[in-house]
């Protein structure tokens, strides 16, 4: 009997959140032959420097594709919803978009930011994805599914979490992936900041580097 390949859906508010929050976990899953899809919610129009807006957006997308490719994700498995940066609002239409993505992909695991993130866009994405997952799991919709839901940390470390992933073997891949976001590295020391958090989480868990996740129950 052929083994069923596990599928992971990573939902990120901005280009680079996917790598910061769970880049090591992504690389680990791919090393096991598992499948990854990444959805970037915003278009990055306010976080790519100055210049022509279309060029900024295109550059942010190319950085993301290159970063994901470094982890082993093919270009066709990265999708951009292109919503306005720093202007996300909760809406039924937004929830339905996420439900649609979940119903098409049918993931075994969904990753998205935790609800106490300091970044407003991150909290909105948490709220929207949480509602979409609830509706998918509730039986109210024909798109019924029950993936394991894991919240990740980006700018605000979580106080409580249940899952610890040892990413020591994949930390160099994560580092290389972060470095693809050249526009962000001009103003943010992402490499030291992100790997510093992963090192701290690893120290807490008795390994060198780790990512942590909060399990969302029904």
Image: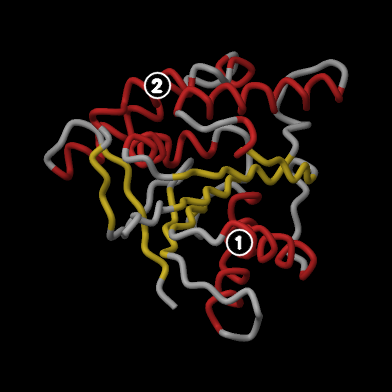
Horizontal relation, residue 149 to residue 51: left or right: left
State the image quarter where residue 37 is shown: top right
Which residue is at the front of the view, 146 or 88? 146
| Residue 35 rendering spot, x and y as whole percentages | 46, 44
| Residue 2 rendering spot, x and y as whole percentages | 35, 55
Horizontal relation, residue 153 to residue 211: left or right: right
Q: Is residue 33 above or below residue 112?
A: above
Residue drawn at x 37%, y 64% is 215
For the residues carrying marks 2 and 1, which lies nearer the camera in this image?
1
Which residue is at the front of the view, 163 or 148? 148
Residue at the disc numbered 2: 175
Q: Secondary structure at mark 1?
A: helix
State the image quarter where residue 207 is shown: top left
Residue drawn at x 40%, y 21% is 175
| Residue 184 rendering spot, x and y as whole percentages | 60, 21
Q: Residue furthest left?
A: 206
Residue at the disc numbered 1: 102
Residue drawn at x 74%, y 19% is 49
Horizontal relation, residue 49 to residue 128: left or right: right
Q: Is residue 130 above or below residue 24?
A: below
Which residue is at the front of the view, 122 or 83? 83
Q: How many marks?
A: 2
Which residue is at the front of the view, 19 or 118? 19
The CA span between labels 2 and 1 is 29 Å
Q: Secondary structure at mark 2?
A: helix
């Amino acid at each position: 009997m052929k083994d069923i390949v596990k599928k992971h859906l990573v939902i990120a508010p901005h280009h680079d959140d996917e790598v910061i929050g769970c880049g090591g976990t992504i690389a680990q899953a791919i090393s096991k032959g598992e499948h990854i899809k990444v959805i970037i919610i915003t278009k990055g129009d306010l976080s790519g420097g100055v210049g022509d807006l279309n060029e900024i957006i295109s550059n942010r997308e190319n950085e993301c594709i290159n970063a994901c490719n470094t982890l082993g994700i093919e270009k066709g498995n990265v999708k951009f919803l292109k919503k306005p940066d720093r202007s996300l609002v909760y809406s039924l239409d937004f929830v339905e978009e996420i439900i649609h993505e979940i119903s098409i992909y049918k993931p075994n695991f969904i990753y998205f930011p935790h609800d106490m993130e300091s970044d407003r866009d991150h909290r909105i994405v948490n709220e929207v994805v949480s509602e979409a997952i609830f509706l998918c799991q509730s039986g109210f919709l024909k798109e019924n599914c029950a993936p394991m839901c894991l919240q990740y940390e980006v700018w605000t470390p979580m106080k409580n979490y249940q899952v610890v992933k040892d990413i020591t073997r994949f930390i160099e891949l994560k580092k290389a992936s972060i470095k693809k976001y050249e526009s962000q590295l001009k103003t943010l020391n992402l490499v030291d900041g992100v790997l510093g958090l992963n090192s701290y989480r690893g120290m807490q868990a008795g390994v060198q580097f780790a990512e942590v996740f909060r399990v969302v129950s029904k």
